[in-house]
Image (cartoon, rainbow, N blue to C red):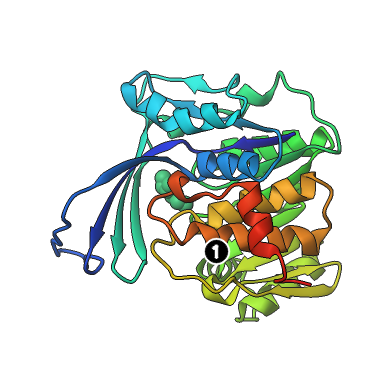
Amino acid sequence: MITVFGSINVDFVTRVAHIAQAGETVLGPDYQVFAGGKGGNQALAAVRAGAPTRMVGAVGRDPFAELGLQPLEQAGVDLSCIQRVDAPTGAAFIAVSDAGENAITVASGANRLATADALSGLTLSPSDLVLLQRELPDAQTLAAARWARQQGARVILNIAPAGQLDPALLTFIDVLIANEGEILSLAEQFGMTVTSPDDIARQMDRDHAITTVVTMGEQGVVAWSDGVRRQIDALPIEVVDTTAAGDSFCGAFAAALHRGFGLTGALQRGVAAGSLACTQLGAQSSIPLLAAIETALDGQFA
Ligand code: RIB
């Protein structure tokens, strides 16, 4: 089982000619509403990629809660540990430019009240995976990582969004996933002298024994584990919207590990899912199914 402890949002998405600068107003033609949140997106990506998945997080007592949870429920994600709290369900305001880039502002709402206590009644085994991100309070993410490690499960931390990371988290994780901006920010925080994402990943692997994966958009991913470097190219696609590409990678990567693939096979499946997610607008609306991932992989990595 994959347990995702993370954020659940409702995304309000509008297309714009360009992303607004500070102080600027940009007009978009209309907007669409999708379920989102890095936690919810990664849970959906994991279940769609073939792994039994449980989502743990918090929503409000408002109508947006059902909107945020509906795709997870429909896909068969276990929602029995979802907390209902006295705060509005998280919301994200997303502008997607004609070039497919995005700018996201998150109003955390109920996510700020999510607690790792919600995990305490669960029992995990070494075949289980726990998938974490950084949209919940740091102390709760740390408590979840510590608990998961005590249970003997493998712990994957996606350090999105970028920001100061509690160094204690590194004690409890097996795999760290970051994009280029996030890994550079981590290196700066830890005073590393190396400056390329590749070298930073190598150093994280060497100094902390953490498998470190850097997602690099159209350049695919680089990963270091046990002193071995792997690089997987992205699939050639037409980018519509990059929202949730990283989440799709994380969920499909975790699902492939859970299904018994080694690191290379899991990276390939994560890359395929991340690439496919860029071909459609929205977060959860764009997350691919297992069949699409495997079809996309056919002949790519022979
Ligand atoms: O990673 C994409 C997600 O970030 C969006 O779904 C939005 O809700 C924010 O959490």
Q: Is residue 43 visible?
A: yes
Residue 282: image x %, image y %?
39, 50
Report x, y in % for residue 40.
52, 38
Q: Quadrant of residue 175?
A: bottom right
Give residue 116's position: percent from left, percent from top: 61, 29
Give residue 207's quadrant in the image.
Answer: bottom right
What residue is rendered at 79% in x and 24% in y? 123
Q: Is residue 287 left or right of residue 146?
A: left
- Position of 52 with respect to 282 (left or right) is right
Local secondary structure at mark 1: helix
Q: Quadrant of the N terminus?
A: top right
Q: Residue at x 35, y 54 (%)?
A: 104
Q: Quadrant of the C terminus?
A: bottom right
Residue on which the image places disc 1: 275
- For the point 43% across and 20% down, the residue is 85
Whether 287 is drawn above or below 127: the answer is: below
Mark 1: amino acid:
Ser
Q: How many neighbours does mark 1 have within 10 angstroms: few (below 14), some (14-19), or many (20 or more)? A: many
Q: Position of residue 267 (x, y in %)?
A: 71, 62
Q: Is residue 113 visible?
A: no
- Number of numbered discs visible in the structure rendering: 1
Indicate left or right for 11 with 8 as reference: left
In percent of the image, x 70 and y 48: which residue is there? 254
Kindly tell me whether mark 1's CB lies below 8 Å from ligand 1: no
